[in-house]
Image (tube, rainbow, N blue to C red):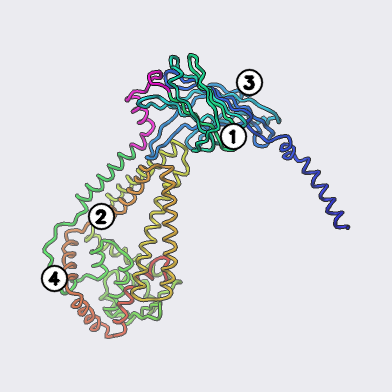
Amino acid sequence: MKILKILLFFGIVSIFFLSHSPNIVSAQAGSERILDFNSQIDIREDGKLVVKETITVQAYGNQIKRGIFRDYPTSYKNVLGFYSSVPFNVIEVKRNGVNDNYHFEQIDFGTRLYIGDENVFLQPGVYKYELTYLTDHQLGFFDNHDELFYNITGNGWNFPIDKVSAQIRLPQGINASDIEAFAYTGIEGAKGQDYQVRIISQDPIIASFETTRPLRLYEGLSVVLEFPKGFVTEPTIIETSERFLADNFLLLGSIVLSFVFVAYALITWLMAGIDPKGKVIIPEFSPPKDMSPSLMRYIERMQIDNENFSVALISMAVKGYIRIEESGDTYKIKKLDEAKYDQLATEEKAIADNLLAKKDSFVFKNKDYMKVLTAKSDMTHVLDTTDGERLVIMNKKLVYVAYAIAILIIATSVFLHHLNGKNDIGLFSAIFIVIGSSFTFYTWINLKNKIGLLLNKFSCLRLLQIIAIAIAALFATLILVVVLIAAFYYLGIISVIQIALTFFITVWYTQAIKVRSKLGKELHDKILGFKNVSDSNRNRKIEDNAQNSSKDDRNIREISSFRNSIGDKCSVGGTI
């Protein structure tokens, strides 16, 4: 019984405070809403519209505190990405018949007009706002008629609207029988028919629209009015072209820049990115003299990858300087003969100096990955600046120019949308296209390499890595698809294609512009001749050389497995 009395006491107290809450009082008195929305539109003979909107609101200080705001679209973009601007010039703003303060703020594809004073709070009550403004480029000019398609209320109101009406005054001289008028109600894109229309036959003619039910949150009224041609001055081709160029000069500039980029890439590639003419390929039964395997691979691929590192280690084992030992998924190199150090190639010495300078063995483990990265970096530096630079020409200056043009294209393509509509989503979409494309491309390539390693030698760890990378690749692809869809909507087809093509052309150009020098081409021809020899003869010769050098059968058996694994194990984020 005592518990019931306590609950009853708290219930009474709660009811008292809730009943005296300002929000509840407002709810009891009525919710904030638009009581009446009236728009009077005068279509002038020059094609401009003079619009007077009278918006009567019920305010309780909840959302309508200092005044109201009105969003006007001032920039339209088609599916290709071309813009069409719409002038919006305020003539007069009044509240209850008296001029009121107002200011503007840019929003996505439009302008927001704030009405009121930030330092003045409105008392609960009914307020009538009158907005008069001039706009242009709202009419459509077709072969058989001219047309006004106008959203009277907009669809951004988070208040119900009790009543909407619009009176549209046409130019003088038009007959009522030549008028076609209809409308749509509902949320954006809806085709509701909750309206009635009357044509007032006078000169000039007035088309009067009125809703037949209250509109809910984010619902609006859009009207369509078709009338004969010849009563409104249609823009000339020159005027239309000038307007199009003014609205899209950045996009058109980026398109021209894209053609310049493609021409630059092709012309410079034809001029500087093709190897000197080689000689007839003659079969070679031994590698070119004084060339290490990693340098041969560098000349052949014209780039340094993980396998350059593994090939260098195998070469060091073949020369008898180290022995490669395998235990499960762990690899270990052990120094055999310090005297063989002088036989190593320059990049092989760099590896030995990093991994075996202070001890006679090195185990590839995660904790020592920085040592491996340092060894790979030193090896890359040797190949790139010693023999590599006189054998392979990188054409870095040409690449830097291509990078500059590519960045300019992407920046221009992205920021023009930001400038035209303060389009933040489009800006981030473009950035994520580049980042997402790179990450997605990398994950799929990495997945392909991991699968190749698994097929060469099965292990549970590699299988788990493949599953993890496959999930990452699918997730990255899904995110990229979502980003592309958003980018198509916010940027348009042209800009998305520009960004994607610029990215892929840049990737291609970075590799394609590399060229072998005359000496590099001669050595490359010899490498090709060596590759053309049958695999059985070449492999037998390599094994014979290895046996003569190390006399260690276990080391030879492990070289093939090591070569297919160690490059992956030495990559960043892999298992070392």
Residue 572 as seen in the image, left or right of residue 72:
left
Q: Which residue is painted at 66% across and 26% down in the image?
A: 127
Q: CA distance from mark 3 to mark 4?
A: 96 Å
> Label 1 belongs to which residue?
215
What label sits on residue 283 in the rendered view? 4
* Marked residue nearer the N-terminal end (3 or 1): 3
Q: For mark 2, what is the residue?
A: 512
The image quarter in which residue 324 lies: bottom left
On screen, residue 426 above or below 554: above
Q: Which numbered disc, 4 or 2, marks the residue that appears first in the sequence? A: 4
Name the residue furthest front: 177
Which label is found at residue 385?
Answer: none
The disc labelled 3 sits on which kind of residue? Val
Report whether residue 128 is seen.
Answer: yes
Q: Which residues are magenta?
A: 227-252
Query: Cβ–Cβ below 8 Å for labels 3 and 1?
Result: no
Q: Residue furthest right?
A: 1
Using a 10 Å C-alpha cutoff, classify the residue at mark 1 as few (fewer than 14 neighbours), some (14 to 19) or many (20 or more).
many
| Closer-to-camera residue (180/433) | 180
| Secondary structure category for the residue under label 2 | helix
* Magenta portion: prevailing SS class: helix
Q: Which residue position holds label 3?
A: 98
